[in-house]
Image (cartoon, rainbow, N blue to C red):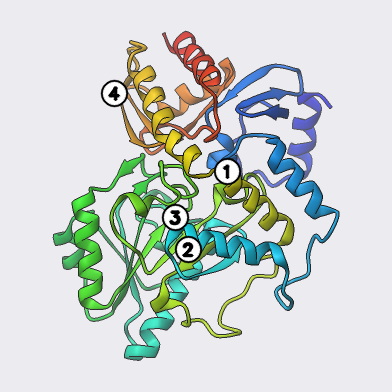
Amino acid sequence: MTYEELRELDHSYVVRSYGRNPIAIDHGQGATLYGVDGREYIDFASGIGVLSVGTAHPKWTAAVEKQAGRLAHVSNLYYSEPYIRLAERLCTRSGMAAAFFGNSGAEGNEGVIKLARKYSWEKYGEGRGTVITLNRSFHGRTVTTLAATGQDVFHKYFFPFTEGFRHADPTIDSVKQAAGHDVCAVLVELVQGEGGVFPLDKGFVQALAQLCADRDWLLLVDEVQTGVGRTGALFCFQQYGVQPDAVSFAKGIAGGLPMGGFLVNEKCRHVFAPGDHASTFGGNPISAAAACAVLDILDDGAIRQVNEKGQYLRDGIEALGVSCLGKTRGLGLMIGVEVQDGLSNKELCAHLNEAGLLSLTAGPVLRFLPPLTITKDEMDKGLAVLKAALS
């Protein structure tokens, strides 16, 4: 079908909740995608951080095809091998104790919020269910995770939001000021993605972990975007020298198939009992097999290269000499690029997409989240498009 035919059908039959770019993608390989018209695009977006091993990676494709021919779904009323293998590998590589599988990042964050509230209820009783989150944070689009999100722009239309959240700045003094007898946990992104790609200060994070330990609050880390190698470690918390009580994940875990969930430490392993939390599709065999393939591809050597690739891209962007762009920030292949005052990052992003470089925005910046398997040749092509489009 042509782009025009697809657009007409979309407008006729799909809820208009997305501001789509005038591009229809047909297929791809690695970090190179092709439109229905055959036009080539370099992918610096990876489906908003989902395509961790790129498009159509042969090991990923083989794993999905093999599992699809064996078992697509059985539900969590029964055991199946793929999700068990995945849980073992995630726990072994992260130092966590147990895993829960769902379908999305918002679902993972809902899960850790419920976990913290049950932990506190069982130990301290009623009235200790508030979760502190940070200003500029983003934790999802359900009514509860929107309430947890520390950005006013998302707090509209859908009132009343779920109660039990308080927002603070990323400083210990601000967190202490927001605290009270009713707090059970703190939920943070170690790199605030949607807020503008702001890495948290390492000293603050370590002091926060100590504060949580002292007051028996659970330290919850939202790794929906930062996890699965994106920042140069399997999970970003491994670079901060802390061990959370629970960690949510999604996006890149299954390399393109829907999957999310959370990991818990030994202290929280037995908080949930049968019936406390569930997900019909959680641990789906095909998604779990895909995730195992992702972990095969993203071994320790591949993840170490993420930091090298991220530095190469950041150096390349800053060396372009494009007047509309400023400095870069981020970790690994999670990159934010400042936009000069008076310019719109959304307009620049649309221009880059049109020019053949798929890109994103976040807060005030351009955001680049290329596949972790991107090659030097693909990075160079993307930099060339960036320079030509914005010079």
Q: Residues within 10 Å of mark 4 (few under 14, many from 20)?
A: few
Does residue 241 show up? yes
**Mark drawn on residue 39:** none
Q: Nearer the viewer, mark 2 or mark 3?
A: 2
Q: Residue furthest left?
A: 173
The CA distance from mark 2 to mark 4 is 34 Å
Q: Which mark is residue 156?
A: 3
Amino acid type at image mark 4: Asp
Q: Disc number at residue 341?
A: 4
Q: Are marks 4 and 3 in contact (CB under 8 Å)?
A: no
Mark 3: secondary structure: loop
Q: CA distance from mark 4 to mark 3?
A: 27 Å
Residue at (60%, 64%) from the top-left corner? 102
Crowd band around label 2 with a 10 angstrom C-alpha radius: few (<14), some (14–19), many (20+): many
Secondary structure under tag 4 reads loop
Q: Nearer the viewer, mark 4 or mark 1?
A: 1
Question: Which label's residue is closer to the chain start, 1 or 3?
Answer: 1
Q: Position of residue 171 (x, y in %)?
A: 18, 55
